[in-house]
Amino acid sequence: MPAWDWGYAFEVLPQLLRALLVTLEITLLGSVLALVLGLVVAVVRQARIPVLDQVLWALVEFVRSTPLLVQVFFLYFALPRFGITLSALTVGVLGLGLHYATYTSEVYRAGIEAVPRGQWEAAAALSLPRSRTWTGVILPQAIPRVLPALGNYVISMFKEVPLLLAISVVEVVNKAQEIGSQTFRFTEPFTIAGLLFLVLSYPASVLVRRLERRRAA
Amino acid sequence: MDNLPRIVPVLLQGLPPTVIATVGGIALTVLLSFLAGLALLSPRRWVRALSRVYVEGFRGTSEVVQLFWIYFVLPLLVGVQLVPLFAGVLVLGLNHGAYGAEIVRGAVRSVPRAQYEACVALSLSPAQRMRRVILPQAVVEMLPSFNNLFIQLLKSTSILSLITVAEVTQRGRAVLVPAFGDDIVLIFTLMLLIYLVLSVLITAGMRFLERTAAGRVGRRPSRAARVAAVTTGAR
């Protein structure tokens, strides 16, 4: 048996590509959750409401210091105890989104803090309402600056999706393992799975780096 | 709560493999970060290219795929089956070393040009220049980013449960959940707390190193570097 069988590789490729769509779907939904929730946390924390601020800080630090895999298990096995039963896919999106929201909230915060004080004062002088200050003045300046960092975290999320095979989400790596255990040939499926990640995430990270350089210039 | 005395010892059984994987992974990460990071700055084109392939290859693929590839595929190709824990340390080191290489490269490049010129003026050899002047200053810049990287690595040790390493996550998931199903919330909360304590220990250690390294070059630890470590999303 040769170490690499091209015929077999092409045979398993379509199945892996279909599973890749699941990976992309989870990445997309998880990113939306992480990007939106992170922004909400960052804006709320900017108000520095006593107690709430400390609670959010502790929550962010806790989620960020503990493994995503354990958090996903927690959501998958413990939530049903509270009467909430979610599909593995939903748990995956939720886990990934919540975990990365803690990172994006810090990124947004840095962006918000980089907006000069004068902008806040000008908005106050014009007696803009709070919501207009955020949507018209602060965020349009804060968000473009942090786009590259947010992009990096989206790429990280994409690469973390395979973790979800532990709760039997059928993404690429899980599919590769399933194919491998049916045919007893693991080399091709796992190698292709790895290459699929590389093919998508390398160009994405090159794009992010280009964006970064343009921002710096 | 009644089962607490039975749950805690099982989780603690998982502590040694988790700690070994973390410490071993960190050691390999540091080694590879400096090797590949300095190679990225080499004047020789092929050395830079080789290091670039390693860095992009490991940063571009998923850690779980790397783990499965080394554990399931590599033995088929070379005929040697790795001990799960060893395969785990290898993957943790190789993966995080690729990220660390960029940290090292960035920090070395951030040392002001005047420092290089001063070394030339003092006619220090390139090796002396790197060891005595550039690296001591660069290390101060690297440490906050390495702190983050090491915490990522600690968190990644949980994926070793997927290749049957009996670490904390595997103990909880494979042993405790089937046996004490009613205490599921307690089990996972304890697991998360164990990781939290370990990551606080890593941060405490790194803060100490930050102070020491900064003190050696007559500086104070930089808060800006600490903030940048999280907010650039370099990982």
Image (cartoon, coloured by chain):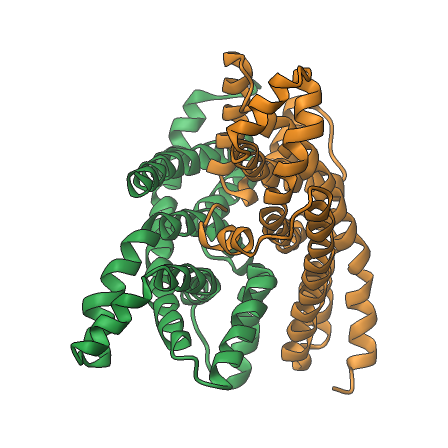
Chain colours: A green, B orange
Q: Position of residue B233 (x, y in %)?
A: 45, 50
Count of all numbered marks drawn on residues in the image: 0
> Which is nearer the eye, A107 or A29?
A107
**Point 77% across, 53% down: residue:** B19
> Residue at 36% across / 34% down in the picture?
A206
- In the rendered structure, the answer to whether residue A3 lies left or right of residue A23 reads right
Q: Quadrant of residue A78?
A: bottom right
Would you say residue A25 is visible in this rendering?
yes
Q: Nearer the viewer, residue A212 or A198?
A: A212
Q: Nearer the viewer, residue B211 or A53?
A: B211
Q: Residue at x 52, y 33 (%)?
A: B112
Q: Is residue B84 visible?
A: no
Query: Where does the image place residue B170, in percent across and percent down from the top left?
Result: 70, 59
- Picture quadrant of residue B223: bottom right
Left or right, A55 with respect to B207, comes to left
The C terminus of chain A, quarter of image = top left
User: Toward which corner of the image does residue A62 lie, by quadrant?
Assistant: bottom right
Point out residue B227 in the picture as x, y percentages from the top left corner. 51, 56
Of residues A132 and B14, the one nearer the viewer is A132
**Quadrant of the frame with the N terminus of chain A:** top right
